[in-house]
Image (cartoon, coloured by chain):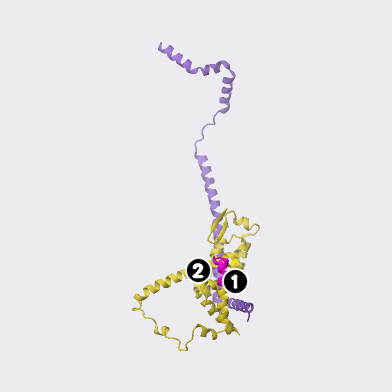
């Protein structure tokens, strides 16, 4: 019997004992530990690029690990990789939705708070050197330049680029992880590569 | 720089950034991983405990019910069977049984008369 879950089709007949036949709980634990240790750094970097905050990125990664272990830890280890990236992207999307709502709420409250808490004039002041993101790119090392350029990408393009190019997922796996069609993945990826090359190639020469 | 070179370079830079995470971040990631694995073990134990507990409760209920129920005498099925056999084997008595209503009516009539 199959059930539709947010993460795809799940078989009710796939019990833990059937799927890990022959593997002791300790071996299962070690396999899961090894898998998570393998992906955690890349997952953190993706979450950090998407959210821009270290703490939020750590929360996103921790939630993703918990979800994988708790809900899908009994699945065969070969299925963990696409599941984990899908969970992570889903958590990143959730974070963005919450952040958007929070920012909108703050913008509504702003007229009422302006009088009490005026904006810091130092923060409001223009950069005396007239630097913009493009100028900053030219003055940073190549790794930081890539980070800045990736953060300028729309979220979907950023996800498509990182999953396809860095994580090495194919188009179908990326579409599954992002919860969109393969055509959308190709479009997002193509636009991301085009943008990044325009931004970085001059800088990397 | 062609597209393949660009993609390879970006992969290399991303790999380097992942390898150069600071100790604090690595420690937090390690803690998150351990928490996830612990939750898996906890849910596994909890998952196994539910059927075991349910089985134990049902067993206790069945055994208690059986012990507390008053034990009625065992029906004497063999005797009934033997009586049935005698009735069936006797043609006279079978006819008597078939006319039981008539005999009862006769007895009432005699009593009234």
Judging by colour alone, the chain drawn in yellow in this rendered image is A
The kind of secondary structure element at disc 1 is helix
Residue A22 in the figure: left or right of residue A116: right
CB contact under 8 Å: marks 2 and 1: no
Queried whether the magenta region covers residue A186, the answer comes back as yes
Chain of the residue under label 2:
A
Residue A85 visible to an observer of this rendering: no
- The letter of the purple chain is B
Question: Farthest residue toward the top?
Answer: B113
| Magenta region, residue range | A177-189
C-alpha separation, residue under disc 2 versus residue under disc 1: 18 Å
Residue A185 image offset from top left, x and y in percent? 57, 69
Q: Residue at x 52, y 40 (%)?
A: B66
Near mark 1 (Cα within 10 A), the count class, few <14, some 14-19 or many ≥20, is some
Quarter containing the N terminus of chain B: bottom right
Query: At which x and y percent is residue A81?
Result: 60, 66
The x and y percentages for residue A98 are 45, 69
Q: Can residue A133 be seen from the camera position used here?
A: yes
Specify the quadrant of the image occupied by residue B25. Answer: bottom right
Could you say which disc has been placed on residue A164 in the image?
A: 1
Q: Nearer the viewer, residue A52 or A67?
A: A52
- Tell me the quadrant of the picture where the C terminus of chain B can be found: top left
- How many numbered marks have been drawn onto this rendered protein structure? 2
């Amino acid at each position: 019997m199959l059930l539709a879950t947010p993460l795809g089709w799940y078989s009710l007949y796939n019990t833990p004992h059937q799927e890990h036949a022959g593997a002791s709980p300790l071996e299962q634990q070690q396999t899961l530990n090894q898998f998570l240790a393998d992906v955690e750094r890349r997952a953190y970097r993706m979450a950090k690029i998407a959210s821009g905050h270290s703490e939020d990125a750590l929360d996103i990664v921790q939630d993703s690990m918990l979800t994988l272990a708790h809900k899908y830890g009994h699945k065969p280890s070969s299925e963990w990789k696409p599941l984990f990236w899908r969970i992570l992207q889903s958590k990143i999307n959730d974070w963005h939705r919450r952040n958007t709502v929070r920012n909108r709420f703050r913008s509504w409250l702003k007229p009422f708070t302006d009088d009490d808490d005026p904006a810091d004039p130092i923060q409001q002041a223009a950069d005396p050197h007239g630097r913009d993101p493009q100028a900053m790119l030219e003055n940073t090392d190549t790794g930081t330049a890539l980070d800045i350029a990736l953060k300028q990408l729309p979220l979907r393009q950023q996800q498509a680029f990182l999953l396809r190019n860095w994580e090495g997922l194919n188009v179908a796996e990326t579409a599954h992880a992002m919860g969109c069609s393969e055509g959308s993945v190709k479009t997002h990826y193509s636009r991301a590569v085009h943008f990044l090359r325009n931004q970085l190639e001059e800088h990397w020469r | 720089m062609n597209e393949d070179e660009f993609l390879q370079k970006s992969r290399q830079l991303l790999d380097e950034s992942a390898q150069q995470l600071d100790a604090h971040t690595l420690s937090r990631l390690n803690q998150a991983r351990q928490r996830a694995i612990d939750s898996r073990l906890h849910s596994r134990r909890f998952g196994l405990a539910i059927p075991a507990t349910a089985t134990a409760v049902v067993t206790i209920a069945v055994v208690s019910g059986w012990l507390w129920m008053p034990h009625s005498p065992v029906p004497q099925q063999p005797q009934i069977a033997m009586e049935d056999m005698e009735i069936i084997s006797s043609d006279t008595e079978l006819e008597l049984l078939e006319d039981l209503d008539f005999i009862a009516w006769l007895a009432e009539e005699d009593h009234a008369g």
